[in-house]
């Protein structure tokens, strides 16, 4: 009897799992809400464990590097020298750029706001490439927003809780980002496939693209701001290419989630222009009574 | 009164398993680790073989679902794989407890293949993108190593012993 009951119980649990799997496959929004509700509640407990574990891992990595500290020091000095040269060049370019903008009266895009969060959980399994960060709706994070690390685009927000959000990394199977390749201007879709170098698909002319070319967001989807650095072309194939990402996923500790909204398209009359149905019935301008205004009526 | 204290003791043991499972899950999800073993499976396998009464199927399922939800994976599929693998080990528990660690390890590796392979199969059957086979194989290999570390930590350091005798195990699965 007990054995039969146990089998029935296991059967019921299996059905629950299959039911949830069907809901997941159908992209049920309630499941995503449940996911974020659980993440909201579990965040403090997860962070309490993940911080010391991450600290321990970082300590071990640092210990490995410690043996090569002299060589690293020399390399860093060389790097500083090189960067000083770049800094001077960048300052000169910035001055020149400011002068040219002033001359051309260029209208600058409004500043993009952001919220910075710390990564406290990282899916280590083979099925998903996503991370949880400790900022959410209370910090102004919105679903679909772009997230960047210090070097470039890291992913997009796919779930928002009150105090946590889930970021889908560019390497995930479900990640698709419209990008452009410079200097050729070729456009394509960056498609994650669980490898470290995602595929760049739907290139019109792959011969115009070469290894080392810069890859930036194109902004064609209206979701990501244009011109965010994504990475560089690592290899070129038949109508496709591989992109080496700028974001460092090995050391993804802090991310900035951008608060950006595209400029509203002009597809309807603004408030200054009345709809035709009203404009026919209302006078175009209010007649002015000259006697009521001394400035207009006076003088004679 | 004896029944009440027995129930309280069992509840505490289940809570102990749930805590160990949650801890394993939290370590698995810690950022910066890269590819990790299925630590939750390692802990559940240890309990399913050595302390099956303290690891009810519902608790294993709840932990599996929590992981599916937190790591962004296919919800329900990962939990089902975990449940199937641990139930297999639970059924073989009486035999495995009498065998060497090597034989136990081989069975655990086979169960880890089920835990990782079942979700892969389910995802593939629904025509969604499946992870690379190399990634899944690496996960299974890491889990086998992680299981050895788990046994060392739980049995060697924390002195957690089996709470069933071989006869108890036979009784539990109706092999008398």
Image (tube, coloured by chain):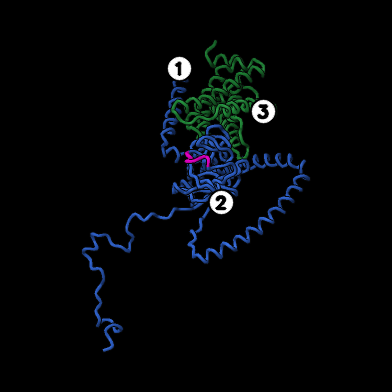
Closer to the camera: disc 2 or disc 3?
A: 2
Q: Chain of mark 3?
A: B
- Can you say which quadrant of the picture contains the N terminus of chain B? top right
Disc number at residue A4? Answer: 1
Residue A221 at what x, y percent from top left? 44, 46
**Which segment is the magenta one?**
A202-207
Disc number at residue B149? Answer: 3
Chain displayed in green: B
Regarding mark 3 in the picture, which secondary structure is present there?
helix
Q: Is residue A27 above or below residue A261?
A: above
B59 or B142, which is in the foreground? B142
- Residue lying at the far top of the rendered structure: B176
Disc number at residue A58? Answer: none
Give yes or no for residue A204 being in the magenta stretch.
yes
For the point 72% across and 42% down, the residue is: A62
Distance of mark 1 from mark 3, alpha carbons?
Answer: 36 Å
Regarding mark 1 in the picture, which secondary structure is present there?
helix
Closer to the camera: disc 2 or disc 1?
A: 2
Q: Is residue B37 above or below residue A186?
A: above
A42 or A64, which is in the foreground? A64
Distance of mark 2 from mark 1, alpha carbons?
Answer: 54 Å
Residue position marked by numbered label 2 in the rendering: A116
Give yes or no for residue B61 being in the magenta stretch.
no
Distance of mark 2 from mark 3, alpha carbons?
Answer: 36 Å
Residue A84 at what x, y percent from top left? 69, 56
For the point 73% across and 50% down, the residue is: A78
Can the viewer see residue B102 in this picture?
A: yes
Residue B99 at what x, y percent from top left? 65, 15
For the point 52% across and 13% down, the residue is: B174
A102 or B111, which is in the foreground? A102
Instruction: Indicate which disc, 2 or 1, sits on the residue closer to the N terminus.
Output: 1
């Amino acid at each position: 009897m007990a054995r039969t009951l146990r089998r029935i119980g296991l059967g019921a649990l299996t059905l629950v799992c299959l039911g949830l799997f069907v809901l997941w496959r159908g992209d049920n929004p309630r499941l995503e809400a449940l996911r974020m509700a659980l993440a909201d509640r579990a965040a403090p407990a997860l962070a309490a464990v993940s911080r010391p574990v991450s600290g321990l891992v970082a300590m071990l990595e640092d210990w490995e590097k410690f043996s090569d500290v002299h060589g690293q020091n020399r390399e860093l000095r060389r790097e500083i020298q090189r960067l000083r040269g770049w800094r001077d060049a960048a300052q000169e370019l910035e001055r020149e750029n400011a002068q040219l903008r002033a001359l051309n009266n260029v209208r600058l895009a409004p500043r993009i706001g952001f919220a910075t969060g710390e990564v406290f959980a990282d899916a280590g399994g083979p099925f998903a490439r996503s991370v949880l960060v400790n900022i959410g709706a209370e910090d102004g994070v919105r679903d679909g927003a772009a997230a960047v690390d210090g070097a470039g685009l890291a992913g997009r927000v796919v779930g928002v809780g009150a105090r946590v959000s889930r970021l889908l990394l560019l390497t995930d199977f479900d990640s698709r980002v419209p990008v452009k390749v410079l200097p050729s201007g070729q456009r394509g879709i960056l498609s994650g496939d669980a490898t470290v170098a995602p595929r760049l698909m739907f290139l019109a002319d792959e011969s115009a693209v070469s290894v080392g070319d810069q890859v930036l967001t194109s902004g064609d989807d209206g979701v990501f701001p244009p011109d965010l650095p994504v990475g560089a072309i690592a290899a070129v194939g038949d109508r496709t290419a591989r992109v080496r990402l700028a974001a460092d996923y090995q050391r993804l500790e802090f991310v900035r989630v951008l608060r950006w909204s595209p400029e509203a398209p002009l597809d309807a009359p603004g408030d200054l222009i009345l709809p035709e149905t009203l404009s026919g019935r209302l006078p175009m301008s209010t007649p002015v009574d000259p006697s009521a205004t001394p400035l207009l009526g006076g003088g004679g | 009164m004896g029944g009440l204290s027995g129930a309280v003791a069992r509840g505490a043991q289940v809570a102990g398993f749930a805590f160990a499972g949650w801890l394993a899950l939290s370590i698995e999800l810690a950022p910066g680790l890269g590819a990790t073993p299925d630590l939750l499976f390692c802990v559940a396998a240890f309990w399913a073989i050595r302390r099956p009464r303290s690891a009810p199927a519902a608790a294993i399922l709840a932990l599996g679902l929590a992981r599916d939800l937190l790591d962004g994976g296919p919800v329900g599929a990962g939990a089902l794989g975990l449940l199937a693998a641990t139930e297999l080990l639970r059924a073989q528990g009486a035999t495995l407890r009498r065998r060497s660690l090597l034989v136990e390890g081989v069975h655990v590796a086979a169960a880890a293949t089920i835990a990782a392979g079942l979700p892969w199969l389910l995802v593939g059957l629904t025509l969604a993108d499946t992870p690379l086979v190399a990634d899944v194989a690496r996960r299974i290999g890491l889990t086998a190593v992680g299981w050895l570390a788990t046994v060392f930590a739980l049995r060697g350091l924390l002195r957690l012993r089996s709470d069933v005798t071989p006869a108890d195990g036979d009784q539990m699965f109706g092999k008398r």
